[in-house]
Image (spheres, helix red, strand yellow):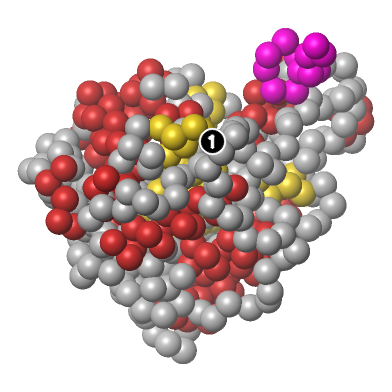
């Protein structure tokens, strides 16, 4: 890959990411921890074949191929029914590089009957030699704090994005240049700036074949204008104006904040699916469900800290996520929202922690490891009164009278045309 390409949001401005709850990423190249386990029974998804259901869009970088496979229909809870335990695993700046972490976690998901959300950075679809096509808000053309890509990197990333979508995973966006802090960082952007950034992120996905000179390659099998319904902002900054822009552009959720483990509500018209604070083993305070934040509180801004402690640090992250899971699973059943990067920090132990968490929780009874799209669909399918009732439960608080009594009131029928409504018979 091009030397300027630094996946896993591996940008060099470490100081800009120092805030403990920033959700920022600073990384370095390096081999990831070897995979363990074998792929699940589902075969790798092929590229969409030309023909019946496929309709090319624009230059053929994307295509309409029908409804997304493996996307279950959301159902409205029945009276007295305990809600499922949702868990969302999501990835900022998703792309495939020499570490092969995108492909690794697709295999992890498949063997555990899970789907995930991959927040694709638009500049990972743009070759270095075409960098001036990117006009970042409040920065000079061709600027990016995470670099750009090369032909092989684009091909590999497209292959992973295509396969992930065909397996039922969601493709969101992590925008483009990942600018944080002062001096033009996303926290200073206007609504118009965000609209420009979102439009460009879409355009790089919708024109990757032309920009990369790969006109004979297979398209991505989705209409990105319809696929893109949510995001996480760089360093969790700029939420206010981002949400205003996103709502006007038809987005359905935002996951750029920090919250407790409680049931989500809408904010500015979008589902607030923020990451959450969970127990931090060995500490008296709680930690955000993101690899970067565990790292900062273990090795500081050094992405490769004391080798003798790296395994312990990975165990701390895994155990913190599992304690947060158990607290919700046995308590209020609030969805657990986890965010990470494709990285090799501290010997790859955070990637091990995530993989072991997926392996531990996703096949438990009444657990659904889903994408943000699936979670938003389920929330939209519920009676608002049911969600209001769930929101009265505190962190780890199970209903004292039991779930059957707590949700005993029959929910109102879902309006026609919304998730969870009866199918229309023709």
- In percent of width and height, residue 297 lies at 41, 66
Residue at the spot 56% in from the left edge and 73% down from the top edge: 352
User: Between 423 and 397, which is closer to the camera in this rendering?
Assistant: 423
Quadrant in the rendering for residue 31: bottom left
The residue carrying mark 1 is: 54
Can residue 216 be spotted in the picture? yes
Q: Residue furthest front?
A: 51
User: Between 3 and 333, which is closer to the camera in this rendering?
Assistant: 3
Quadrant in which the C terminus appears: top right
Task: Find numbered disc 1 in the image and state the secondary structure of the residue it sits on.
Answer: loop
| Left or right relative to 58: residue 138 | left
Quadrant in which the N terminus appears: bottom left
Magenta span contains residue 200: no
Image: 190 above or below 260: above
Can residue 183 be spotted in the picture? no
- In percent of width and height, residue 152 lies at 33, 65
Q: Residue furthest left?
A: 140
Quadrant in the rendering for residue 354: bottom right
| Left or right relative to 12: residue 338 | right
Residue at the spot 21% in from the left edge and 70% down from the top edge: 3
Q: What secondary structure prevails in the magenta region?
A: loop
Residue at the spot 68% in from the left edge and 14% down from the top edge: 417
- In percent of width and height, residue 75 lies at 78, 28
Residue at the spot 38% in from the left edge and 18% down from the top edge: 248
| Left or right relative to 218: residue 70 | right
Image: 280 above or below 375: below
Q: Write the start and end of the magenta stretch as one range.
A: 412-426
């Amino acid at each position: 890959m091009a030397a300027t390409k630094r996946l896993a949001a591996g940008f060099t401005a470490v100081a800009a990411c120092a805030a403990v709850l920033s959700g920022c990423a600073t990384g370095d190249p390096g081999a990831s921890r070897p995979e363990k386990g074998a792929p699940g029974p589902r075969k790798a998804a092929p590229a969409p074949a030309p023909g019946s259901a496929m309709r090319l869009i624009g230059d053929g970088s994307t295509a309409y191929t029908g409804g997304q496979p493996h996307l279950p229909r959301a159902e409205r809870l029945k009276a007295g029914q305990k809600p499922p335990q949702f868990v969302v695993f999501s990835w900022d700046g998703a792309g495939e590089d020499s570490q092969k972490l995108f492909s690794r976690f697709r295999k992890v998901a498949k063997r555990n009957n899970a789907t995930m959300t991959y927040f694709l950075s638009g500049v990972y679809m743009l070759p270095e030699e075409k960098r001036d096509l990117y006009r970042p808000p409040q920065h000079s053309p061709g600027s990016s704090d995470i670099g750009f890509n090369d032909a092989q990197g684009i091909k590999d990333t497209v292959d992973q994005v295509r396969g992930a979508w065909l397996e039922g995973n969601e493709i969101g966006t992590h925008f483009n240049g990942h600018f944080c802090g002062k001096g033009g960082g996303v926290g200073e952007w206007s609504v118009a700036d965000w609209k420009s950034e979102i439009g460009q992120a879409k355009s790089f996905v919708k024109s990757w074949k032309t920009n990369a000179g790969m006109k004979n390659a297979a398209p991505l099998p989705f209409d990105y204008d319809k696929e893109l319904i949510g995001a996480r902002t760089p360093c969790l900054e700029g939420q206010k104006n981002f949400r205003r822009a996103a709502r006007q552009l038809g987005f359905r959720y935002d996951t750029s904040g920090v919250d407790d483990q409680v049931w989500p509500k809408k904010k500015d018209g979008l589902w607030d699916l923020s990451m959450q604070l969970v127990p931090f083993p060995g500490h008296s305070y709680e930690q955000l469900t993101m690899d970067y934040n565990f790292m900062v509180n273990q090795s500081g801004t050094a992405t490769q800290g004391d080798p003798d402690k790296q395994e312990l640090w990975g165990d701390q992250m895994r155990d913190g996520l599992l304690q947060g899971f158990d607290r919700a699973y046995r308590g209020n059943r609030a969805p657990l929202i986890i965010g990470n990067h494709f990285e090799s920090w501290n010997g790859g132990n955070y990637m091990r922690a995530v993989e072991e968490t997926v392996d531990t929780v996703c096949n438990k009874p009444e657990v659904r490891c889903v994408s943000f799209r699936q979670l938003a669909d389920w929330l939209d399918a519920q009676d608002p009164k049911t969600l209001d009732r769930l929101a009265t439960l505190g962190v780890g608080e199970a209903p004292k009278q039991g779930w059957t009594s707590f949700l005993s009131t029959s929910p109102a029928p879902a309006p026609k045309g919304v998730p969870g409504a009866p199918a229309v018979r023709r």
